[in-house]
Amino acid sequence: MSLKKVLAQIKNHDNFLITSHVNIEGDALGSELAFLRLVKALGKNAVIVNEDRLPYGYGFLPGLSNIRKYKDNLKGIKFDCFVVLDCSDLKRTGEVYRMNKENKPVINIDHHVCNCRFGTFNWVDPYASSACEMIYELYKKLGVKLDKDAALFLYVGILTDTGSFRYSNTTSVTHKIVAELLSFGLDVVEIYKNVYGNLPFKDMKLVTHVLNNIKRRHNGQLAWFEVSGAVLKKYKAQYVDLTDYVMNFARAIKDVEVAVLFKENLGVKNEIRVNFRSQGKIDVNKIAQGFCGGGHKAASGCTVQGRLADVRSRVLKKIDAALDAIA
Ligand SMILES: [Mn+2]
């Protein structure tokens, strides 16, 4: 069993480099910090290296000084095991995977359906709500006691990946785990305020601009938004991921089955990030895979080369066809 092998690898190594995916968010960050705390409790060394800077809303988490940015001076980091969390593909770590020049064993712990099993040791559980739910299991299996900080990290990951416990990945197991985490005295009001109530005002202006230009097609079953590079520049928004904000509004509209956000990449010409959300009838993991992306049945994404209008038309046609197929 892959979990057993992962447990053995954790026991057998002493120095871990931990990373996750680009566009880092709650589950990636929470699982990294919780994994780091876990191995430190076992008397081992660990450091987290991420491609991106910390997103808004997570500055309140303890232990952030354990996180280094890939662009920073990383000399002196030694590791004998490379741990990738909440990440479907090694290339989704950005450039961080390049640090494993000496081909140290790679542990891959993830819950994405589309995970490509890139690790030397893979533990992939698509039924877990979040990577954090899997890290919780590691604590139990390794006999490491949770404390308030570990509970906080795990809670943040589960909270964000389940859309605050309202997506279909929320199970009785999820709630049982969360019940235990809350017993450490977590302040759910304060956590929610930090994660979801911290958007800079100019970013909210961008959100309202994007919402204002929402479009629908397919008898209102398909809603979509787009954010051009020009609009991003105009609003000088700092927050990189508007997806959850605009998608929540799209999903609130009667009859909407699928919502899509197209965003021009400011850094790379003719590269479009596409994010999908589904109410359940359409498997958007499959749609994203058609464009070399992936994720979950109800939430996925891909990066497509091409001009915004061309990419948009190609992607929307695929969703039209999927909606036709269930009609
Ligand atoms: Mn996740």
Image: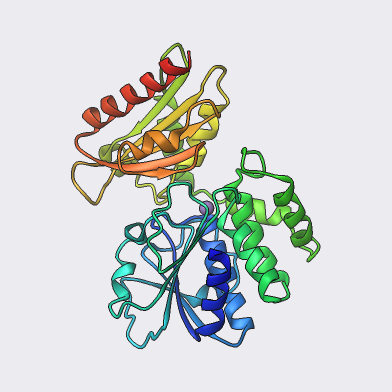
- Taking the spot 48% from the left edge, 45% from the top edge, the residue there is 201
Decide which of 18, 196 is in the foreground and name it: 18
Residue 314 is left or right of residue 61, and the answer is: left
Residue 56, percent from left and from top: 49, 56
281 vs 178, left or right, is left
Is there any visible trace of residue 197 in the rendered image? Answer: no
Q: Is residue 271 left or right of residue 282?
A: left
Q: Residue at x 39, y 29 (%)?
A: 225
**Residue at image x 55%, y 54%?**
125
- The image position of residue 34, as x and y in percent, is 59, 69
Q: Identify the image quadrant of residue 33.
A: bottom right
Q: Is residue 278 above or below residue 254?
A: below
Query: Which of the 4 image quarters holds residue 83?
Result: bottom left
User: Residue 89 in the image: x percent, y percent?
Assistant: 37, 56
Number of marks drawn: 0
Q: Is residue 64 visible?
A: yes
**Looking at the image, which residue sits at the far front?**
1
Q: Quadrant of residue 315?
A: top left
Question: In this rendering, is residue 2 above or below 63?
Answer: above
**Residue drawn at the location 52% of the way across and 67% of the way down:** 32
Looking at the image, what colour scheme do you see? rainbow
Front-lying residue, 323 or 213: 323
Question: Which corner quadrant holds the N terminus?
Answer: bottom right
